[in-house]
Image (cartoon, rainbow, N blue to C red):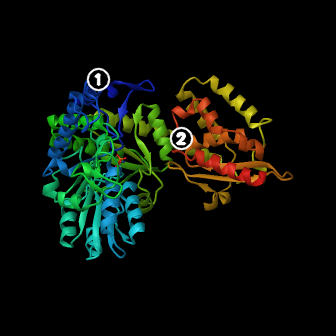
């Protein structure tokens, strides 16, 4: 197992000058040389559209695509390849079932059972189906360890239950759910079961027939394969009675304007040209995994999980989220004492070459249940080694000891809370453009991300205090990774100059707020509306290291400011 990482070209690269440690396999696994080569060979030698051409190339491409389906069927233990529909991923697979099966099968008063552990892609499609049909959603609760409450599940099952949609493994906590039992109980109540297998298939064997799953979904990119390809397994008798999901080429038998008849399985559910090279890459990934064996992979990852849990237990102030007895190699945590925003944890680990994920992991209902807005998560794959975990733990220990020093220093200088009036920052330049030029000049002296990062953190340290009274729900802006509050006002004595205070739990965001204040605070509404701060952040190279639009609420903050400016500009 120690040599497996050598087969992954990306794992031989460096990040910020350090050997890359990749601990985000629950988001996407990396691809081994064998998969990269299979996809590249396909593009170099075999590409053509499938199912249509009589020429050799098209026949070969068709053969490769259908052969990939047969490999998937073998991998899942399906009765036949036609029960395996290629989709763009788990999300598309669940949407297919919720939409096509839901349209034909759900009626007002029917019930759909989900769990608190679900990914948004196993929640929102069912909400859409429920809205369209009048069905209702019931939710299985969890205990504090992150395990499903099976008694509550049994109590929710009733003759009204039409489907139970549940993940095999939770992406946010790593809980492995007792899917065999869940399926058996649902069947006894006359309900179908869809298993979201996105987080299981790369970590242990699956046999859809032994499980008796009605539907099973997974994504190639979490299985050492390419993105944009995934699979929906469905029992033939169910798929046959379902209407098509999308219409188009390849899914028909005969089209007239009066009436269209549909192709048999699996084509009925594969409208349009599919991701042929993705299917080829997925088959190569399955072959590659099978040469190692999922039992061995699982055992290796369990040993990494034990090592990680032990090392993280040594970090002061670290609180694990998700301590189920049956867990896959996913570890989630928050830093509570001293509190350190997960965004800061991930940003600083990145500087040490360690990739982890932070945020709500597309599981906002679960975060609500845990009482946090985000967690930091390390998730392991076949290529990780104990040394990777040690790099993570050492990085966390450094971050914690630096934060402890900072918090001791700030306790030593407690200052009375100043009145907000004094503190709203005035304009630092004639216009946002002029302020931007000063920022650009300064950043020109900071050639790399570690230096820019430090500068931003320093700026955040000097941010004017935002009084607690202004940190209200009305002043909160939603960001995926941190909590942000912003309070703006018209400068007294003016009717169009806007000043604002803002704050965040993440130091990196505090620094970005300081930059926004330099650009906008004290400027006229019209100037605020006309200036594009995101373009400036790209100009000073921040977009390479911080995804502005999705991750840190920065874009929502700019939007909020512009809304306020719009109101006062009339
Ligand atoms: N379900 C779970 C449990 C997942 O972890 C993910 C991906 N994070 C998905 C569904 C969605 O997968 P995809 O984005 O590949 O469609």
Nearer the observer, 239 or 192: 239
Which of these two is toward me, 367 or 430?
430
> Which mark's residue is nearer the viewer, 2 or 1?
1
What residue is drawn where x is 67% and y is 28%? 440
The image shows residue 429 at horizontal and vertical percentages of 78, 35
Q: Secondary structure at mark 1?
A: helix
Q: Residues within 10 Å of mark 2 (few under 14, many from 20)?
A: few
Secondary structure of the residue carrying numbered label 2: helix
Q: Earlier in the sequence, mark 2 or mark 1?
A: 1
Which is nearer the eye, 281 or 289? Answer: 281
Give the labeled residue for mark 1: 44
> Vertically, is 264 above or below 65?
below
Can residue 146 be seen at all in this image of the molecule?
no
Q: How many neighbours does mark 1 have within 10 angstroms: few (below 14), some (14-19), or many (20 or more)?
A: few
Q: Mark 2 vs ligand 1: CB under 8 Å?
A: no
Q: Give the side of residue 415 with respect to residue 251, left or right.
A: right
- The image quadrant that residue 223 belongs to is top left
Q: Kindly identify which residue carries mark 2.
A: 405
Closer to us: 259 or 428: 259
220 horizontally vs 295: left or right: right
Q: Do tag 2 and tag 1 residues touch (Cβ < 8 Å)?
A: no
x, y percentage for residue 118?
Answer: 35, 58
Can you tell which quarter of the image residue 512 is in?
top right
């Amino acid at each position: 197992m120690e040599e497996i990482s050598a087969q992954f070209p990306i794992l031989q690269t460096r990040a910020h000058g350090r050997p890359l440690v990749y601990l985000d396999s629950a988001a996407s696994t990396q691809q081994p040389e064998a998969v990269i080569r299979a996809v590249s060979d396909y593009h170099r030698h075999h590409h053509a559209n499938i199912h249509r051409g009589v020429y050799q190339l098209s026949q070969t491409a068709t053969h490769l695509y259908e052969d990939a389906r047969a490999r998937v069927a073998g991998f899942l233990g399906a009765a036949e390849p036609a029960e395996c529909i290629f989709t763009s991923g788990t999300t598309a697979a669940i949407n297919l079932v919720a939409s096509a099966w839901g349209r034909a099968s759900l009626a007002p008063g029917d019930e759909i059972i989900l769990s608190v552990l679900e990914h948004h892609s196993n929640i929102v499609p069912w909400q859409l189906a429920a809205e369209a049909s009048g069905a209702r959603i019931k939710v299985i609760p969890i205990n504090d360890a992150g395990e499903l409450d099976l008694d509550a599940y049994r109590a929710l099952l009733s003759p009204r239950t039409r489907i139970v949609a549940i993940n095999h493994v939770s992406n946010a906590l790593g809980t492995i759910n007792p899917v065999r039992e869940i399926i058996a109980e649902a069947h006894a109540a006359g309900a179908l079961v869809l298993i979201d297998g996105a987080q299981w298939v790369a970590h242990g064997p699956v046999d859809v027939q032994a499980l008796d799953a009605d539907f099973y979904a997974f994504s190639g990119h979490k299985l050492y394969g390419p993105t944009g390809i995934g699979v929906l397994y469905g029992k033939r008798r169910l798929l046959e009675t379902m209407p098509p999901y999308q219409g188009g080429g390849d899914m028909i038998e005969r089209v007239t304007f009066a009436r269209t008849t549909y192709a048999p399985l699996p084509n009925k559910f594969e409208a349009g040209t599919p991701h042929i090279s993705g299917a080829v890459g997925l088959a190569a990934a399955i072959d590659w995994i099978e040469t190692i064996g999922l039992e061995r992979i699982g055992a290796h990852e369990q040993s990494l999980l034990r090592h990680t849990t032990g090392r993280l237990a040594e970090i002061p102030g670290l609180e694990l989220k998700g301590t189920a007895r049956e867990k896959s190699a996913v570890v989630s945590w928050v830093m509570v004492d001293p509190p350190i925003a997960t965004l800061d944890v991930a940003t600083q680990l990145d500087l040490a070459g360690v990739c982890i994920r932070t945020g709500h992991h597309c599981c906002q209902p679960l975060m609500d249940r845990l009482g946090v807005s985000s967690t930091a998560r390390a998730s392991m794959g076949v290529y990780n080694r104990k040394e990777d975990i040690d790099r993570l733990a050492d990085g966390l220990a450094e971050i914690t000891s630096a934060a402890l020093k900072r918090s001791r220093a700030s306790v030593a200088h407690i200052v009375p809370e100043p009145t907000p009036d004094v503190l709203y920052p005035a304009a630092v330049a004639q216009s946002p453009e002029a302020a931007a030029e000063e920022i650009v000049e300064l950043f020109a002296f900071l050639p790399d991300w570690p230096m820019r990062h430090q500068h931003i953190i320093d700026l955040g340290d000097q941010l004017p205090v935002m009084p607690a009274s202004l940190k209200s729900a009305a002043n909160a802006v939603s960001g995926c990774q941190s909590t942000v509050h912003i309070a703006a006002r018209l400068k007294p004595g003016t009717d169009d100059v806007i000043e604002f205070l803002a704050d965040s739990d993440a130091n990196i965001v505090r620094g970005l707020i300081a930059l926004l204040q330099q650009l906008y605070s004290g400027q006229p509404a019209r100037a605020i509306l006309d200036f594009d701060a995101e373009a400036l952040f790209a100009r000073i190279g921040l977009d390479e290291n911080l995804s502005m639009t999705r991750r840190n609420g920065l874009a929502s903050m700019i939007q909020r400011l512009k809304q306020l400016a719009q109101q006062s500009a009339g």
